[in-house]
Amino acid sequence: MAGQENSIVPVERIRWCIFMLRGDKVMLDRDLAELYGVDTKVLNQAVKRNKERFPEDFMFKLDKQEADQLVTNCDRFEPMKHAGTTPYAFTEQGIAMLSSVLRSKRAVEVNIAIMRTFVQLRRILADNAMLREKIEAIEKKYDEQFQQVFAVLQAMVAEEEQPPKPPIGYYTEARKNERGKALRKARK
């Protein structure tokens, strides 16, 4: 993609910092501060001075259970284990709003890289959704074809269950009587 080769932060580094929490893709304040090249405290102070720009769907504070779960599931969050406060999580919209609060050249460049990464993730998810739809269509198509095969097989089995036809050939008088009794019993 044009312009990404010269990005100040590699896309892989940004992807590593994005995760799902409360149904949204988010980044933590500590990761964002590191990317912007500022202390977490400085980032959070700038956000608090502009609190009206960060409604709940842009930024939220993790509860203790969420923070503990992050520490348990990811070694890089180990320093949060003994922290006195829980971190803030920023959604894509909150990260975009950070560019209006943090006005350094690096902050603008990092925000551009982050927004491009979110766009890439959306494309990947959209491609996966299209792939899933194609697979489901193929499964449906083959399910219908297999149903037809099974219907033919059931018809063939049903044909085999019909009473046997009399053999072609000559019978002796004793054999005819036996055969007649057998056929009468089969018909009853």
Image (cartoon, grey):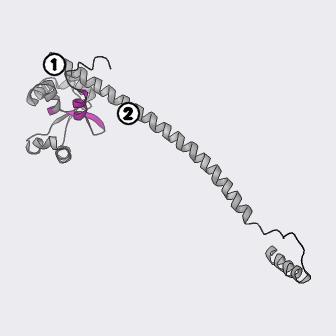
Q: Secondary structure at mark 2?
A: helix
Identify residue type, mark 2. Answer: Leu
The question of residue 27 being in magenta is answered with yes
Q: Residue at x 15, y 41 (%)?
A: 77
> For this view, does 174 lie left or right of residue 147?
right
Residue closest to the eye, 33 or 182: 182
> For this view, does 182 lie left or right of residue 30?
right
Identify residue type, mark 1. Answer: Arg
Image quarter for residue 52? top left
Q: Earlier in the sequence, mark 2 or mark 1?
A: 1
Mark carried by residue 106: 1
Q: Which residue is mark 2?
A: 125
Q: Position of residue 10 (x, y in %)?
A: 22, 26
Q: Residue furthest right?
A: 173
Q: Residue at x 50, y 37 (%)?
A: 134
Quadrant containing the N terminus is top left
Image quarter for residue 90? top left
The question of residue 93 being in magenta is answered with no
Q: Position of residue 72 (x, y in %)?
A: 18, 48
In the rendered image, the vertical position of residue 91 relative to residue 67, given as above or below: above
For marks 2 and 1, give the CA distance: 29 Å
Stretch of the chain drawn in magenta? 1-30
Q: Position of residue 130 (x, y in %)?
A: 45, 33
Neighbour class for label 2 at 10 Å: few (<14), some, many (≥20)? few
Neighbour class for label 1 at 10 Å: few (<14), some, many (≥20)? some
Mark carried by residue 96: none
